Image (tube, rainbow, N blue to C red):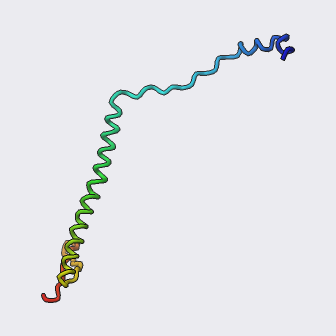
Amino acid sequence: MIAAQLLGLTALAFLAPIPAERYQPPEPPRGVGWAVFAVAALLLVVTVVPLSLALADKWAMDAHAAECRASGGRFAASPSATGRGGYRCDRPDR
């Protein structure tokens, strides 16, 4: 260490280039938070509303099937001309 000081090698450290500054990304423009919130809210509505409607339809059909079975009937699929099937309650007395 003393030999390096005598030769002046420690002074060479001050001649080195200054290290580059760390990159700082620019601040996002104002109002971006509202846009992000609006997109998130739209995605939430688009995913939750159809799911809740499908579950409501399923619960209504389950209630109708339970009522049909309680009356002694059989809850069966009924084909239609449009290709969209439905369900009906087949009771033995009818």
Q: Nearer the viewer, residue 18 or 64?
A: 64
Q: Residue at x 73, y 16 (%)?
A: 13
> Which residue is farthest left?
94
Q: How many marks?
A: 0
Q: Is residue 13 left or right of residue 22?
A: right
Q: Residue at x 61, y 21 (%)?
A: 20
Q: Residue at x 24, y 59 (%)?
A: 53
Quadrant assignment for the C terminus:
bottom left
Q: Is residue 21 left or right of residue 87?
A: right
Q: Is residue 13 left or right of residue 37?
A: right
Quarter of the view holding residue 34:
top left
> Which residue is farthest bottom?
93
Quarter of the view holding residue 52:
bottom left
Residue 30, compared with residue 4, is above or below; it is below
Percent position (x, y) of residue 50?
27, 57
Percent position (x, y) of residue 22?
57, 25
Quarter of the view holding residue 37:
top left
Residue 40, compared with residue 25, is above or below; it is below
Residue 45, compared with residue 56, is above or below; it is above
Percent position (x, y) of residue 84?
22, 71
Quadrant assignment for the N terminus:
top right
Q: Residue at x 81, y 11 (%)?
A: 8
> Which residue is farthest front?
70
Residue 89, compared with residue 59, is above or below; it is below
